[in-house]
Image (cartoon, rainbow, N blue to C red):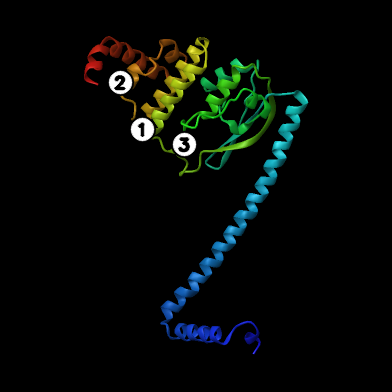
Amino acid sequence: NCSADYYTESEIRDLIKIMDQIERLPFIKKRKIKEDNYNVKLKNKRLAYKKNYQRKIMLIDLKIQSQIAKFAKKNNSDIVTTDFYVTSNKHDTYRKQALEHLNGNSFIQHILTGKIFGGLQLRLVKRCFYEFLSIKFHEDLGYCEDIIFFSELSQNNPKIDYLNKAFYHYSQDNPNSITQHYTLEKLNERKKFITIIKDILPSSFEKEINIAAFNVKMEAKAHGLLSVHDFIWFEKTSFQTIFSSNLPRMTKIYLYIQTIILTIFKKTYKEFI
């Protein structure tokens, strides 16, 4: 009788009809319906947990941002850079990002040579600084847009300060991450990054850009995607870059010999590539 207070007679008849249909179902189909209902409830619980977790992360992020912002305000910083953690095989490694002489040029030089991380995630940039300069991210670039952004900022004498704390975790454990899958498209994006940064930075950065281009080629080589054409013609690697790299001694000698041979026969290669 109580149900009549909430449902019309036709709705009650429809419910009875559905209940009769379920009652006549074979045991296996009844069990499947029960499992489906359980899975829906489980999914809803997971979504609720995820939403609550994201809310907690948001609160943590706000706390971190507040801490960095106070440091920036105290030092009148244009850019604040921090340390970070690299997570690999569920183990965190602390990576310091300190520089002895912190200025726009040294900041970019260390990023291009791989001595410090180039990502925006562990840095805070004063809004009025980049808005006044009308500096924006390159929408047509899918890789290293952070470094391009900082390269443009660095040419305007920013005040950069270092906060000796780590907030950001860079995870290498995600198999679905785009950074874990090297493709020809990714190589082309990295070559495009080198081309753009050459137009931004002055000639005094030639050595650092050559090292950055060499690192792009070595990563492509490690994944079997470095063509002979790119090895010779894309930002020809200087011998100084080869021998100042962190590669093993025999690899350096091999690349040195290979560069000499390919340079001697470059006209022949150019005709057939």
Residue shown at the point (63%, 50%) measured from the top left: 54
Compared with 268, 114 (above or below) is below
Residue type at tag 3: Thr
Question: Counting residues from the N terminus, which is met first, the one under dot 2 or under dot 3?
Answer: 3
Q: Quadrant of the C terminus?
A: top left
Q: Which mark is residue 179?
A: 3
Compared with 113, 185 (above or below) is below
Mark 1 and mark 2 residues within 8 Å of each other at the beta carbon: no
Mark 3 and mark 1 residues within 8 Å of each other at the beta carbon: no
Q: CA distance from mark 2 to mark 3?
A: 25 Å
Q: Position of residue 257 (x, y in %)?
A: 32, 13
Q: Position of residue 255 (x, y in %)?
A: 36, 17
**Residue 170 visible, this angle:** yes
Q: Quadrant of the N terminus?
A: bottom right
Q: Position of residue 237 (x, y in %)?
A: 40, 15
Q: Which residue is mark 1?
A: 184
Question: Counting residues from the N terminus, which is met first, the one under dot 1 or under dot 2?
Answer: 1
Q: Which residue is mark 2?
A: 229
Question: Counting residues from the N terminus, which is met first, the one under dot 3 or under dot 1?
Answer: 3
Residue type at tag 2: His
**Residue 84 visible, this angle:** no
